[in-house]
Image (cartoon, rainbow, N blue to C red):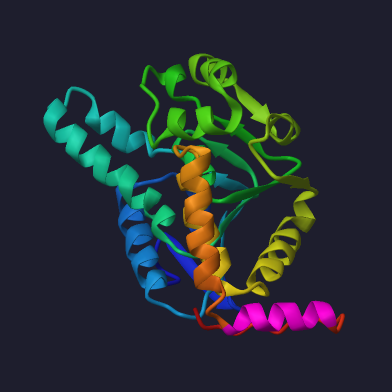
């Protein structure tokens, strides 16, 4: 896949997906959308990866939508543009269809749709020199790729309003303070830290981790009783697995557990 706009490497059960247009600061073109969606479909059917890391080649995570494409949309037929844009966004947001946890390693600027792609991941690590901005309004464009959906759930209405209305770009430290990123790290340590987190997750039992990925999102729109019912049902399923036996035995014997790859 080295010639495509997205490249993939799998090692130690970790899938590293890299946006691969460094000379264009990983602008999100229609070609990249197609490559990205096809890549996600392949990973969905691959039993090896337990965690995915998403990052950008070069000095940017992604500078957002391709300006050339946007310029070509000016004056276009709204019904056609709506359909095309919806497919474009859903292609990148297909990452949310993965059963495995995802980590965005933000290695530089994450702007517009690029910032939204990082929010679509389950966790985010950001290099201290990175910048995050939802700059749609600055070019006269309504936000896209789920910006307000993700932001209101992560940082609340008031901060979402400010970021989207002003289009301001914030530092990694500011993003960390808002709760937009889990950790910040020196640029030269970013991928090592991301791999460290990914390996920790990959060592966990598969079944509860995949259940958690689905259940945490569902809990955002559920009440406590519905959540308790789901927890009770999912725990009952976990009690059928060999991993629960291994986990209990490892605690009793004060040893490192060795979980299976089955679920």
- Residue 113: image x %, image y %? 44, 38
Magenta part of the chain: 242-252
Quadrant location, the N terminus:
bottom left
Examine the rendered structure and indicate whether residue 252 appears above or below residue 33.
Answer: below
In the picture provided, is 84 more to the left or to the right than 229?
left
**Residue 25 seen:** no
Examine the rendered structure and indicate whether residue 163 appears above or below residue 83.
Answer: above
User: At 20% from the left edge and 33% from the top edge, which residue is drawn?
Assistant: 82
- Residue 29: image x %, image y %? 35, 46
- Residue 236: image x %, image y %? 52, 68
Q: Give 249 or 185, whichever is nearer the viewer.
A: 249
User: At 40% from the left edge and 45% from the top edge, which residue is drawn?
Assistant: 28
The picture quadrant where one finds residue 171 is top right
Residue 66 on the magenta span: no
Q: Which residue reaches farthest right?
A: 254
Examine the rendered structure and indicate whether residue 250 appears above or below residue 214.
Answer: below
In the picture provided, is 92 more to the left or to the right than 48?
left
Residue 246 on the magenta span: yes
Q: How many marks?
A: 0
């Amino acid at each position: 896949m080295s010639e495509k706009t997205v490249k993939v490497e799998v090692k130690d059960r970790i899938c590293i997906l890299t946006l691969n247009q460094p000379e264009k600061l990983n602008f999100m073109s229609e070609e990249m959308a197609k490559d990205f969606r096809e890549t996600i479909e392949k990973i969905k059917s691959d039993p090896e990866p337990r965690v995915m890391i998403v990052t950008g080649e070069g000095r940017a995570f992604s500078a957002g939508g391709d300006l050339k494409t946007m310029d070509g949309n000016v004056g276009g037929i709204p019904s056609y543009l709506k359909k095309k844009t919806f497919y474009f966004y859903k292609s990148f947001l297909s990452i949310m269809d993965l059963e495995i946890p995802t980590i965005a390693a933000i290695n530089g600027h994450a702007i517009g749709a690029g910032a939204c792609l990082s929010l679509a991941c389950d966790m985010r690590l950001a290099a201290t020199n990175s910048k995050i901005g939802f700059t749609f309004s600055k070019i006269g464009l309504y936000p896209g790729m789920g910006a307000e959906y993700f932001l209101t759930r992560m940082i609340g209405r008031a901060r979402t309003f400010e970021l989207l209305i002003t289009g301001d770009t914030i530092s990694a430290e500011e993003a960390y303070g808002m709760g937009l990123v889990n950790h910040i790290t020196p640029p030269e340590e970013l991928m090592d830290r991301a791999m460290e987190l990914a390996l920790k997750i990959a060592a966990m039992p598969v079944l509860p981790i995949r259940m958690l990925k689905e259940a945490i999102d569902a809990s955002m729109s559920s009440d406590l009783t519905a959540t308790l019912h789901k927890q009770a049902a999912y725990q009952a399923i976990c009690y059928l697995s060999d991993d629960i036996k291994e986990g209990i035995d490892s605690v009793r014997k004060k040893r490192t557990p060795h979980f299976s790859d089955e679920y």
